[in-house]
Image (cartoon, coloured by chain):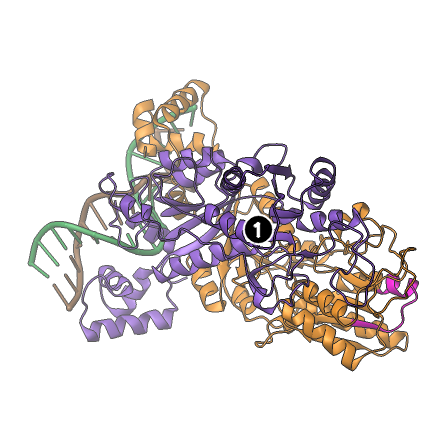
Chain colours: A orange, B purple, C brown, D green
Amino acid sequence: MATMQDVADRAGVSIATVSYVVNGTKNVSPPTRARIEAAMDELRYRRNVVARALASSRTHIVALLHPVLGNRLGGTVMGFVIAASNGARARGYDLVLWPVEDEEQMSHLLAGGLVDGALLMEVRVHDPRVDELVTSSVPFALIGRTHDETLPFVDIDFAATIDTAMRHLTDLGHQAIALVDGNDETGWVADLGPTVRTEAAYREHMTAVGGRSVVISVPPNAAGGIEAARRLRDEAPEVTAILLMNEQAATGLVRGCASSGAPSRATSPSSPSPPRSRWARWSIPCSPCSRRPPGSWGSWASTRSSISSRASTPAAGRCFCRARSCWGSPRLPRLARAPGGAGRAPGRPLSATDPAP
Amino acid sequence: MATMQDVADRAGVSIATVSYVVNGTKNVSPPTRARIEAAMDELRYRRNVVARALASSRTHIVALLHPVLGNRLGGTVMGFVIAASNGARARGYDLVLWPVEDEEQMSHLLAGGLVDGALLMEVRVHDPRVDELVTSSVPFALIGRTHDETLPFVDIDFAATIDTAMRHLTDLGHQAIALVDGNDETGWVADLGPTVRTEAAYREHMTAVGGRSVVISVPPNAAGGIEAARRLRDEAPEVTAILLMNEQAATGLVRGCASSGAPSRATSPSSPSPPRSRWARWSIPCSPCSRRPPGSWGSWASTRSSISSRASTPAAGRCFCRARSCWGSPRLPRLARAPGGAGRAPGRPLSATDPAP
DNA sequence: CTGAAAGCGCTTACAG
DNA sequence: CTGAAAGCGCTTACAG
């Protein structure tokens, strides 16, 4: 692999000049530049990013920290990943997805000086990884937020999401509405921002309308969904509609509800018999709702904000899962001007134009 | 951030000695070691991995290259990711997921000297990224394989998968079996190893049994699935079972088939009317099959090898999607001894004990 | 067992 | 506009 010195030798210039044209840091006379570019082409020169990082204290890498969960990465997460990747590239950074198990591993990564900045996903309300991020001197932003909302973050507006969902269901005439959300043995899922905030918004809504809050928390998998269906039947038989904030449990939930009575076709004119089950018909609106034939199955696992309901009236193509989000929250610009001075102050958003420390 | 020199000063030793204890490269007398370790603790020393990488020519990072597709990352992919991550860590490496759009970006990454090795996913039969990998001097392995099977790879055994699937369906009495696989406007999906090899195995099987091959290739999304259902109805009405090699189209396919006739409960004793649709009942066996009540809905999007069939007889808890895989294929050891000599020869599998070039 | 020193491949004030 | 030189924070033969 050709080095910058090789290029300099071949072009008959100093290594500094080569650096100037490679980085565009200084003006170089056209003839000199041409010689250097020719030499680079001939030698197939590629700058060594490790050496550059050491000399400049900038790696131009942003890490997207994601916990190593067994789960697949859903559409919502991938949306963030792709947007972050594009955003990084547009600013001259590379975005890498870094699977980290705990704050210990994170600390190792951050202290190593290998990343210029970090993005954290699957943020919990009380998250030791965020503490680690704060103590590190690496600029960061959260995708999701902790209880401390002064930290830089972007997040989905769960209150608005719940609001939209509840309005839909009450418009359909539902009053006894349950929330099924996530839980696991470690408490990890229960403390996730989306879980906590959805539940809070749901309870607040139910209290406001004078209804009873029914919250069923189950593991994020098919078995959890089945369990939720069973518990709903046993513990809250009055419930006619469900908000689902546990994508991985969706299939199990539907299956469980369906098997709690024989499925029927309530709206089919050729079926004179009445619905045999409370769960006669399920509708799970989702992103490509516009294409969804009314009353038919939606696409599974579309977004975390999927809403499932017993739609006694077909949903008629409305889409309920476009969660309003807080992108570009006023918090971000404010923190951008936050104190911290030069260098990589914690809590400061990334910027491609940051000076080297 | 404390430097190695700081630690050396504090412990009253040379920087070399600190390096020896940090890396365990040489024996250091217990008292000296103790002083150094104390100094490191007090200073909260963390070795700068960038400097180490430059000096040693090894970054201890392995990149898992994945194309930036809009799709979510399914269970199969995540299985590979997690296994690779654990494997890397066990050998003292960090595994990062690097989203790359094309071979151009890959070349940039590989030449930069930032990764010690690379793993490539979503391999196509003719894949320019693999050519780039071969020309680079970075050791690599493919997850999936191209037409050139002398390159180091691990892959699912698609022939065996199809064999198992076909046996299941023929055991159920099916003869007219169609394959629904993937396609897109760029031809990318159609050239994917899984697509190509599944289709080949399917056609071979059908030819062997004297049946007609029916292959429907549709985009990997819900609309594609609906399209497939329509085309099956129009172009191959004799088909009674389907192999699905297009996870993302699963929901659309089922929806499309269901709406091509009214759904019914063929096996329910309380329903005297005969099935109104050819697609009376669908069963999609999947990983957690053992938990699946016979004849009920499986979990969606479980593996690429999911098989959907019109199970006139309930599948009775058998699981058909544990694809046999080629992990530890004899190819790997052979290539491990392949020519290429010292350093990072192309085509040589990664090893934690590789000497620095 | 320990250390002095060269070197990894760049960047970047500072001079000219 | 161009270059000599120090320096980024380590590793690693080589000596002692």
> A281 or B7, which is in the foreground?
A281
The x and y percentages for residue A177 are 83, 71
Quadrant of residue A353 in the image?
A: top right
- The answer to whether residue A169 is above or below residue B184 is below
> B43 or B286, which is in the foreground?
B286
Quadrant of residue B45 in the image?
A: bottom left
- The magenta-colored residue range is A166-178
Residue A61 appears in the rendering: no
Q: Amino acid at mark 1?
A: Thr
Question: Chain letter of disc 1?
Answer: B
- Outermost residue toward the bottom in this view: A235
Tell me if B197 is positioned left or right of B211 in this view: left
Task: Check the picture and name the quadrant holding the N terminus of chain A.
Answer: top left
> B149 or A202, which is in the foreground?
B149
- Outermost residue toward the top in this view: A31
Which residue is disc 1 drawn over?
B170
